[in-house]
Image (tube, grey):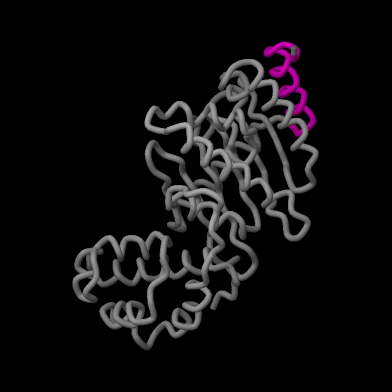
Amino acid sequence: MITSSSPAVVRYYLALRLTQLRTDCGLTKQQAAQKIGRTGQTVANLEKGFNAPTQSDLEKLLEVYGAAEQFPELRELLPVARKRVPKRSAPIPEDYDLRLNLEVDMARLDILGASLIPGLLQTPDYAAAVFRANPNCSDEEIQQLVDARMERKSIYTRAERPVELHVVLDESVLYRSRGGDEVMRGQLDSLLAVARTPSVDLQVLPLDAGSYLGEGSSWTIMTFPEPLRGHPGLVHLDLLGEARYVDDREMVELYRRAWRHVLGAAASPERSLQRIREARSKYGDQG
């Protein structure tokens, strides 16, 4: 049984178990929902970890799945899963909120940035330039998203149990301008400063490194804290219009193999900083 005190981590664990039980029974989300008098969207939200089930819904689902006596730990975990998470300063999409709630309690995040500086390392101006690429975002929504992104940085700077970050940037990201020269100068200066953070390892995958496994895609491998170390972890994928989590054991291991391949091709930390400085010179001097 897991013993995590994080509502988000426990909710996601419940989501994984309920999804597996439903698929083992050969039921669709809609069919399961009908059997407990709920909507398909309710079951979908439970299986995404957006919400925790009520005690009544959990009992009904376990009964439908023929597992009423098999998983007593799910009942014991429910009070933790249903704890209220502090509200954020600004409203953000549910899938993004789930990501923030999960990553805050992870032991480690291994991040490949193939097309953008990853959100956890972005400056406010760079983040705003990225969000402005979406024509459907208003100025107010952009500011809310930027604020939420900046709040995330505390996970690796906090004094107690900082999350370990290992970030590899495709070198092309350093030369793909977002927001103009001034924004890029600030962003690359910030990378050089962040690289001195004890909990952060930062490397660059050189342009001349050739092809690598997983080329062209960005991902984050999320390693759970000690109570869930038996779980293979999650892979978070940023896709157009949605976020996706990969939790299949074989697929997670595939991404871990790809990550090891990327690390083998990346420049050393010292040489990586030099490459960032070289890219920084492209954007001129401030003023």
In the picture shown, does residue 69 fall above or below 137? Answer: below
- Indicate whether residue 278 is drawn in magenta: yes
In the picture shown, does residue 25 fall above or below 66? Answer: above
In the picture shown, does residue 238 fall above or below 205? Answer: below
Instruction: Name the residue at 64% across, 22% down.
Output: 183
Residue 17 location (% of width, % of height): 41, 70
Point out the residue furthest to the front here. Answer: 140
Q: Which residues are magenta?
A: 268-286
**Picture quadrant of residue 148:** top right
Instruction: Name the residue at 74% across, 54% down.
Output: 158
**Magenta highlight: main SS:** helix
Instruction: Say whether residue 27 is visible.
Output: yes
Instruction: In this rendered view, identify the residue nearer to me: 166 or 209.
Output: 166
Instruction: In this rendered view, identify the residue nearer to me: 163 or 92.
Output: 92
- Indicate whether residue 68 is drawn in magenta: no
Instruction: In this rendered view, identify the residue nearer to me: 257 or 56.
Output: 56
Instruction: Name the residue at 56% across, 38% down.
Output: 146
Instruction: Name the residue at 58% across, 39% down.
Output: 119
Residue 176 location (% of width, % of height): 56, 20
Residue 99 location (% of width, % of height): 51, 52
